[in-house]
Amino acid sequence: MASVFREEYPELTWYETNMPRLAIILGIIAIVIGLFAQLPRTKGLYMLIAIGPILAGIVAYARSEATTDIKRVADIIIQATWIMLSFGCAYFVMAPSEYYSARGGLTAIILIVAGIMVVFAIATLVAFGRKGFELTP
Amino acid sequence: MAQTEPTATRVDSFGDYSTIQVPKTETKSLFGMFLVYLGVLICVAVIWGGAELGLGLNLKNMITAAIIGSLILGVIGWFTGYIGGHTRTSTYVMMRHSFGRTGAIVASIAVSGLATGIGWFFIQAWLFSTVLATICNTVLGYVPWIASGPVASIWGALLMCLTAYYGYKGLAFLSNIAVPLFLIVLFSGTYAAVTEAGGFSAAALAIPSNPITMGTGITAVIGMYISGATITSDIARFAVTPTAGAWAWFLQVAIVQPIMLVAAGLMTLLTPAGDVVQSMAYLGIGVGALLLVILGQWTTNDNNLYSGSLAFVTAIRIKRSHMVLIQGVIGAALAFLTSIGFFGADPFMNFLTQLGRFLPPIAGVVIADYFIVKPYVLGIKDPYKRYEFGEGTVYSRWNWAGIIAWILGALLSPYIPGAVGLNSVLIGLVVYAVLAAIFEKSGTAYTSGTYIEPADGF
């Protein structure tokens, strides 16, 4: 179980526990923000991108709880973190585009949420990297 | 039979296990390799292949050509990836068995070191600079200094160097960020193109601007990535299980590639633009178009550099990362000279295309040697025993059956009906298997010279 990981690496416990949670929560927030978009295509895009972090969070939680191998737990969290990072970046690329544009305020809010995804993902990768875990499992 | 672990006590003198087997402690997951492979594919399939299909085929034929061509590539790459997963060596090291030590150097330097690692690297770096300038002009209305051809060709080439310098980890690092992002951008563009054209029913009726036959389309799909299928082992050697790399390759080519080809093809089919990047700019997704150019070329060209450096390191005693820097500087200089018009790119592209015919037969020879000659002619059934490596291993200098099959595969392939790339693989495979079987059964020597592997695997 992941508890073995927490005992071995207490400094990483916060990331190991909260990465899946934050991915799911931020994904759900992005979906809610998407609901306020005027254009159906913008709505669809925001929701579609949000599915990535949500799925990554759910899968990471389920897989990490099911293993006792410390390295495996780290690999699972790191893989999910990469997905959150990449999907977070996707908002930065797509939100400013003319075709998928939203009202100014909404774009700013989604970019803040995406920014939190990216910053948290980078912090998680740095934390695991400092402990010597392989960042490209 | 347990997998051998000879590298446990061996020193990796050249970096990234260029000349020795990858130790089990350094192996990577199927998912990780899947992303690295996809990083190479996204530029090949989306920026070049998809556009070609979209300009030449209607939707139904485009889907059929993409599926058939991709399945063929998936099968060829699965076989080479399987060998890489079992031997845990790069293409150029495993070739020592079927080409001989010197034969492997000649073949790998010609087709992978010089052609891919320097030739195509600089052509792609130059193309990167021209496409970037064009797209900046379309999106911004002007070309900033940093995106001008001569400047972008230099920083573009050096950017691509950066990830290749760090080896597999560098490639994987970039692919982890770029690939999911790239897919979102691509599918957003395709959705926009289909919606603006009136939906999939309208897309099904769209007529290509420059029609080609479905056979030509299949040939194009095979031809655009047959080189990748040949050198699958360069990545698959890191596979956590012997078949993980083979399946990672198969999944990305047979499943994802057709989707990407059709997605990209729809954009050029449904918009007046001539390529995917221009299509995205036309659809108002300018940042996405810029990203396609930068990340797409980067994730593909760093692999060109990486494979080239692996090939060079088997011939020259130099650290792989240093070789990447040398190739990168040469490539950047050539790309710069091309962009200022010092010489044209066309003669180089024609030469490299001709030279490119010599890469796929290598896959045929290696597959024939590992899957036919070793188990059925020489009776070595255990897949871990068919190729042995390590200090003291004796190789021939030249394996003439391999050399002949390789050259015939390259020279005869254009004269046989069908896809040239596939022909060259099949000719290499058949000729090698037949020659080796005849020579073995008749007791005729078909190898010459000996080479004993030193401790560093060189």
Image (tube, coloured by chain):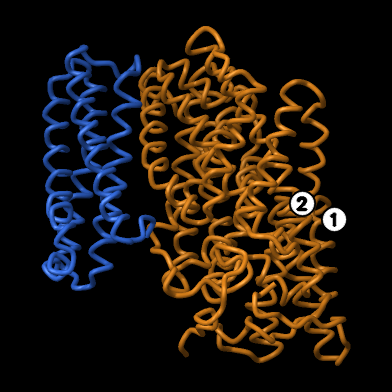
Chain colours: A blue, B orange
For this rendering, which residue is in front, B310 or B239? B310
Q: Is residue B412 left or right of residue B8?
A: right
Left or right: where A55 falls relative to B450: left
The C terminus of chain A: image quadrant:
bottom left
* Residue drawn at (72%, 33%) of the image: B333
Q: Which residue is mark 2?
A: B357
> For the residue labelled by badge 2, is the local secondary structure a helix, a strand or a loop?
loop
Residue receiving disc 1 = B411
Which kind of residue does numbered mark 2 sit on? Answer: Arg
Depth check: give the residue in front, B82 or B263. Answer: B82
Residue drawn at x 75%, y 83% as measured from the top left:
B452
The image shows residue B308 at horizontal and vertical percentages of 67, 53
At horizontal 52% and vertical 82% (from top left) the residue drawn is B9
Quadrant in the picture for the N terminus of chain A = bottom left
Measured as percent of width and height from the top left, residue A6 is found at 13, 64
The total of numbered circles placed on residues is 2
Q: Amino acid at mark 1?
A: Leu
How far apart in space, not on screen, are marks 2 and 1 (Cα)? 8 Å
- As drawn, is B206 to the left or to the right of B437? left
Query: In the picture, residue A69 is in which quadrant?
Result: bottom left
User: In the rendered view, would you say B206 is above or below B229?
Assistant: above
